[in-house]
Amino acid sequence: MFTAVPPDALHSVWPGLRPMLRVLQRKGGGDWIPEDVYREIAEGRAALFIAERSLLVLIAQKETFTGLPVLHVWLAYTAAKNFDAGLQWVREHKKQYGFQKITFDSPRKGWAKRFAAESVRYRID
């Protein structure tokens, strides 16, 4: 379903990704800007996967204390009708590369109806 975009091909696909990133920024917030995403992919700290009108930006992480490999979904954009197929692709990617689990962050509380929350982050002003 998704195709990996190597860092040296990022420049050619970037114009088509910016509108999707703007939507994600509006809906999910966060302190990133599209240029941050570009840099992380270009420097190999994040991996970009694309499909028709869809994108995934994944980051390989390790749990702080156990060191277990975790596949973190930093950004995901797809039509609602393609969500389940995209999720299945991520699960297969997890197995193929030996990750122990998949994580993602979101300020949207509705995700708790579908996925188990490991923690909730609060901000003190």
Image: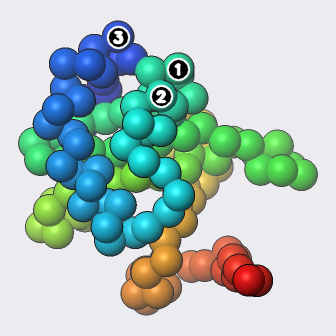
Q: How far across and down, in percent of the image, does residue 36 sit? A: 47, 38
Q: What's under tag 3, amino acid-wise? A: Asp
Q: How far across and down, in percent of the image, does residue 100 sit? A: 64, 49
Of 95 and 72, nearer the camera is 72
Circle 3 is placed at which residue position?
8
The answer to whether the residue labelled 3 contacts the one labelled 1, judged by CB atoms less than 8 Å apart, is no
| Whether residue 93 can be seen here | no
Calculate the distance from the C-alpha at mark 2 to the C-alpha at mark 3.
Answer: 12 Å
Q: What's under tag 1, amino acid-wise? A: Glu
Circle 2 is placed at which residue position?
39
Q: How far across and down, in percent of the image, does residue 78 sit? A: 20, 57
- Where residue 84 sits, quadrant-wise, is bottom left
Circle 1 is placed at which residue position?
43
The answer to whether the residue labelled 2 contacts the one labelled 1, judged by CB atoms less than 8 Å apart, is yes
Which residue is at 12% across, 67% downward?
A: 81
In this image, 65 relative to 53: left or right? right
Q: Residue furthest top?
A: 8
Calculate the distance from the C-alpha at mark 3 to the C-alpha at mark 1.
Answer: 10 Å
| Whether residue 54 can be seen here | yes
Residue 109 in the image: above or below residue 58: below
Find numbered disc 3 in the image and state the secondary structure of the residue it sits on: helix
Find numbered disc 2 in the image and state the secondary structure of the residue it sits on: helix
